[in-house]
Image (cartoon, helix red, strand yellow):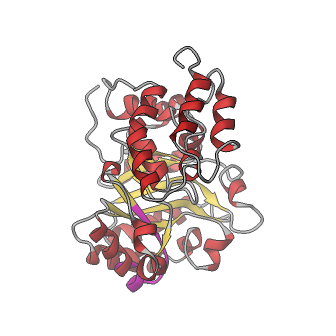
């Protein structure tokens, strides 16, 4: 197998309160070719908020996409331009999140019921950032709209507005009666509809999301699709990303050891501590690195329970000594 040149071959999902700049930097060390996504940023926050805090990122994160939430084409266009000027490689519109908080703001999965509005948003964003791809992350449908035509008509209308990349969580979003967590698990997966979209619209880039928990499930489903997007599996077991990098992007990739990853992380930790960040805001993303390995529980305990507001690199050294006692 040759190295993949598809920009969306391996994507790491935008996850609220998880995929901040620290998490993304860490994931980049594990998967050099993965496409990283920010947490969703509401358009108004990008325009009026503290931009460096919301949008700042490290150059090592490239390629990295900014996910925006909103339903006002003019505001989304303005926010997209701000993101492009910050240096993002892609602007993604959230049309997939089913949480109550998102529904109340009239964005996320509920917008699938308004394909004309989504198309207007995409067109406005693309006009504002003609140099970047404007992509859409969506579901298969909303509530009990399980007719394949509902999904197809949504894609057709949004594609006509200029979107060429669709990242599809292969479930419906049930907007009433389920929590966000349940919405990731209860609505049935329907991978066949995503494969059918790629078969019928080969000119579109189609990325599969949802229920992909390990390398075997990814290998079973990738088929003719352009890529996959991994969510919580990448967060809870981040070393999985090394296997996916090799499977999807570079068959000759030599994965670093977990200890080597932490050694590569060290300059970043020094930099962020010097900038005033607290170590505990970074270590929370590292807890799963030794998932399934001896002494993994002690690693998690040190980095989560024993970390303090003023902790420094000595805490990292102590955690590494716990999982690599012979090297200590």
Q: Is residue 68 left or right of residue 145?
A: left
The residue most toward the right is 177
The image position of residue 186, as x and y in percent, is 72, 51
| Quadrant including the N terminus | top left
Q: Residue at x 54, y 66 (%)?
A: 150
**Rendering quarter of residue 104:** bottom right
Give the mark count: 0
Q: Residue at x 28, y 63 (%)?
A: 87
Of 300 and 233, the residue lying toward us: 300
| Quadrant including the C terminus | top right
Q: Residue at x 62, y 59 (%)?
A: 172
The image position of residue 194, as x and y in percent, is 48, 50
**Is 315 rendered above or below residue 94?**
above
**Is 123 rendered above or below residue 98?**
below
Q: Is residue 65 left or right of residue 13?
A: left
Range of magenta residues: 66-77
The image position of residue 272, as x and y in percent, is 43, 53
The image position of residue 185, as x and y in percent, is 69, 49
The residue most toward the top is 326
Q: Is residue 72 magenta?
A: yes
Q: Residue at x 35, y 79 (%)?
A: 77
Can see residue 223? no
Of 107 and 200, the residue lying toward us: 107
**Rendering quarter of residue 212:** top right
Q: Is residue 286 left or right of residue 195?
A: right
Of 312 and 106, the residue lying toward us: 312
**Rendering quarter of residue 243:** top left
Q: Is residue 36 magenta?
A: no
**Is 75 rendered above or below residue 180?**
below
Can see residue 74? yes
């Amino acid at each position: 197998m040759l190295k993949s040149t598809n920009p969306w071959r391996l994507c790491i999902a935008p996850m609220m309160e998880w995929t901040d700049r620290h998490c993304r930097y860490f994931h980049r060390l594990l998967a050099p070719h993965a496409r990283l996504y920010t947490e969703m940023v509401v358009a108004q926050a990008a325009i009026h908020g503290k931009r460096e805090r919301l949008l700042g990122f490290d150059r090592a994160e490239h390629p990295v996409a900014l996910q925006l939430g909103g339903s006002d084409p003019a505001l989304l266009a303005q926010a997209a331009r701000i993101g492009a000027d910050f240096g993002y490689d892609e602007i993604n519109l959230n049309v997939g999140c089913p949480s109550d908080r998102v529904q109340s703001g009239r964005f996320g999965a509920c917008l699938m019921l308004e394909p004309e509005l989504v198309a207007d948003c995409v067109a406005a964003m693309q006009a504002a950032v003609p140099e970047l791809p404007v992509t859409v992350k969506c579901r298969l449908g909303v509530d009990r709209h399980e007719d394949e035509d509902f999904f197809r008509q949504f894609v057709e209308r949004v594609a006509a507005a200029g979107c060429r990349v669709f990242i599809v969580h292969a479930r419906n979003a049930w907007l009433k009666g389920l929590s966000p967590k349940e919405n990731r698990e209860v609505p049935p997966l329907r991978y066949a509809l995503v494969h059918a979209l790629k078969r019928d619209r080969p000119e579109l880039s189609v990325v599969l999301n949802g229920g992909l928990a390990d390398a075997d499930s990814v290998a079973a489903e990738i088929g003719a699709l352009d890529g996959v997007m991994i969510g919580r599996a990448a967060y809870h077991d981040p070393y999985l990303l090394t296997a996916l990098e090799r499977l999807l992007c570079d068959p000759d990739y030599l994965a670093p050891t977990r200890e080597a990853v932490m050694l590569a992380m060290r300059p970043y930790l020094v930099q962020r501590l010097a900038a005033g960040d607290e170590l505990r805001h970074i270590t929370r993303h590292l807890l799963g690195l030794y998932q399934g390995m001896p002494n993994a529980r002690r690693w998690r305990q040190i980095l989560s329970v024993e970390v303090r507001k003023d902790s420094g690199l000595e805490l990292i050294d102590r955690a590494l000594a716990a999982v690599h006692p012979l090297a200590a």
